[in-house]
Image (cartoon, rainbow, N blue to C red):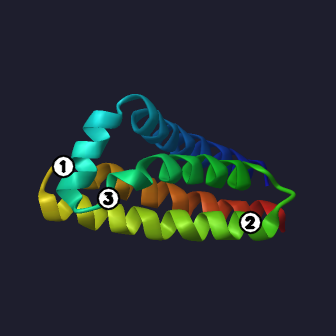
Amino acid sequence: MKRNKIIFYVSTGLLTLILLFSVYMYFFKHEAVAKMFTNFGYPTYIIYPYAVAKLLGLMAIWNSKFTTLKEWAYSGFFFAFILAFFAHYMIGDGGQMTALVALILLIVSYIFNKKTQQ
């Protein structure tokens, strides 16, 4: 059981670092992110709400009381990372590896979250 918790905390912690860096970029490097979103063909007005959604998703994942919200957060991040992978891949900016690492960390976090709840 201790091994499962360690794996959960390490994977979720690394995932959190990636997402917090992303949120930092969205709030404090808005011009660079807006340019990237324009290259993707996405509207720039979703940058701030997307950053807030990432923060709320992280809070749901770390909070053990909200099991339904946690499932929704994992699901939302899963689809966001898949879409991010393909968006970065299609424009060829090299960002797809970060999305892939985040996706792997998310899956590991989800699996070991379930194992620690048993």
**Label 3 Cα crowd, 10 Å radius (few <14 / some 14-19 / many 20+):** few
How far apart marks 2 and 1 lie (CA) works out to: 32 Å
Q: Is residue 103 left or right of residue 36?
A: right
Q: Position of residue 61 (x, y in %)?
A: 69, 55
Q: Position of residue 13 (x, y in %)?
A: 60, 41
| Residue 15 screen position, x and y as percent | 52, 46
Residue highlighted by disc 2: 69
Closer-to-camera residue (34/96): 34
Amino acid, disc 3: Pro
| Residue that carries the numbered disc 3 in the rendered image | 43
**Callout 1: 10 Å neighbours few (<14), some, many (20+)?**
few
Comparing 111 with 25, the one in front is 25
Circle 1: element type: loop
Choose between 94 and 53: the one closer to the eye. 53
Q: Secondary structure at mark 3?
A: loop
At 36% from the left and 55% from the top, the residue drawn is 99
Q: Residue at x 46, y 70 (%)?
A: 79
Q: Can you tell which of label 3 and label 2 is closer to the viewer?
A: 3
Type of the residue with mark 1: Gly
Q: Amino acid at mark 2?
A: Leu
Image point 69% across, 70% down: which residue? Answer: 71
Q: Is residue 13 left or right of residue 86?
A: right
Q: Which label belongs to residue 94?
A: 1
Label 3, label 1: how far apart the Cα atoms are = 21 Å
The label shown at residue 33 is: none
For discs 2 and 1, the disc positioned in front in the rendered view: 2
Res 114 visible = no
Mark 2, secondary structure of its residue:
helix
Give the quadrant of the C terminus. bottom right
Q: Earlier in the sequence, mark 3 or mark 1?
A: 3
Which comes before the other along the chain, label 3 or label 2? 3
Of the numbered discs 2 and 1, the one sitting upstream in the chain is: 2
